Image (spheres, rainbow, N blue to C red):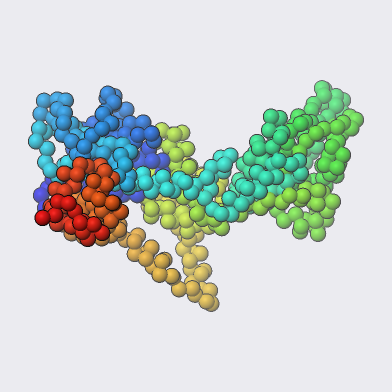
Amino acid sequence: MQETEKNLLQTLERIAKLLSSYGSFDSILKQVLHVIETEAGLKDPAITILNFSSSLRPKDKKREELEKKYKPPLKDKVPFNGSTFLISPIRIEGRDIGFISAIAEEKDVREEVLSFLSFVGSLIGFSFFVLAKEKTEVKNVGNIIFRSKQMDEVIKLALEVAKSDATVLIRGESGVGKELLAELIHNNSPRKSKMLVKINCAAIPENLLESELFGYKKGAFTGAITDKKGKIEMADGGTVFLDEIGDLPLPLQAKILRLIQNKEIEPIGGQPKKVDVRIISATNRNLEELVKEGKFREDLYYRLNVIPIYIPPLRERKEDILPLVEFFIEKFNKKYKKNISISKGALTILEKYQWYGNIRELENLIERLVLTSSDLVITPDDIPDYIKEKIHEEEKRKKEEPEEVLPSKREKKAEENKKKTALQEIFEKLEISDSRGLLSLIEDIEKKIIENVLAESKNISDAARKLGISRRQLEWRLRKYKIEFLNYGRKSSFQK
């Protein structure tokens, strides 16, 4: 294999790895452009996805908008002496969704270079197709990112109860997103135009909590030189979110009960006054046990628990990890002006971890990884040792259990696939051998695509239209690859 062809194959492998990683698609495309420019020797590469994102190129270089009608691959412009402008389409299922272009610093461009650019366009199209499919499964409701059925049911219930004024008790471990759910309920309620006041009952010292909640009158105690409204009164007409309600002291529990029953508060040193608020509370503690121990009022428990909503921990809905990782990577890429993505191997480690700190722990880790990553892609080596050690301990514990569950065929297959390169996975899906040169691989891929389209087409013209080429071009390829349309249900008109 010649040196140029070998280099292009290595570059394709690098690009395939990038496109199979996870993160912001814009960031991944920028990484692909960087690799094309630095490793393939093509200058000023650009990718344009029509109706998806703006044209992307390293260093935000400017260029006039390119023609939207083109044939793959083209050598139609020579912008500089001795240089050739190349352009190739990016397609999904026969539909052009964009194009990739670059400048080759030579007049007679080798066939391998044209095939390379065309193949990169195909890889981008395939990745965009997978991305679009995944995006339809991921939901973002009130900044709550999820794909799992469990969270879908939680969100549906929250949106339904938002219509009423009933008290809601949100339960779940620390870091699962109880505050976000309270915001979602308020923002979809008739009270959304009024304030949502958040109070963390565990974060405020007990001797200050009463004045924070209910306010005080001038002269009520030393230092009370003016009247002060409590947070509950500030929320009049809106919603009060009492986080960590299980930590509320018993004397104040009686005052909250009075608020719920009578819609009434009493500032320190003042007279009772009416307020109109909805109460949403949250806790990660076992309130039933606290009631038994006499640490939480039973009557208040029943008043708060009119509509209970339970948010499951992240380890019980691991299908939400990928969309959350992508969301946080995009968030911190913007914050720190980076273009980081994450490899499948690193993501697999994150999916094995139990996440006892839930989404808050995941967010903190992704911020750390984006900040400290020295490469464009977060790899397994970047994952902190404590996570790997916890996974190892968990796996060891499972092995020591009396009944060992053997891995399923699907799990064994997934383990085998981890050892394959990104390009090998694509070749296997297309039933193509990767043991030959670049041009042979491109021809095999083209033949396989033509055969797949023919199988779903009415005639030669219909197939050519789906492929985005002329009937004559398709007939030439059918002869070249010795494909008989008769094998696909109909006889071709050009068969001799």
Residue found 38% across the figure and 34% down from its top:
51
Residue found 25% across the figure and 50% down from its top:
459
Residue 245 coordinates in the image, percent (x, y): 74, 46
The reply to whether residue 61 is visible in this rendering is: yes
Residue found 46% across the figure and 63% down from its top:
392
Q: Quadrant of residue 65?
A: top left
Left or right: 347 as drawn, with respect to 7:
right
Left or right: 32 as drawn, with respect to 213:
left
Of residues 438 and 241, the one drawn nearer to the viewer in this rendering: 438
Left or right: 161 as drawn, with respect to 323:
right
Left or right: 420 as drawn, with respect to 105:
right
Residue 69 coordinates in the image, percent (x, y): 26, 32
Most extreme residue toward the top, as rendered?
Answer: 226
Q: Quadrant of residue 420?
A: bottom left
Q: In the rendered view, tell whether residue 157 sits above or below residue 29.
A: below
Residue 72 coordinates in the image, percent (x, y): 21, 39
Most extreme residue toward the bottom, as rendered?
Answer: 402
Residue found 42% across the figure and 52% down from its top:
347
Q: Quadrant of residue 226?
A: top right
Q: Quadrant of the C terminus?
A: bottom left
The reply to whether residue 115 is visible in this rendering is: no
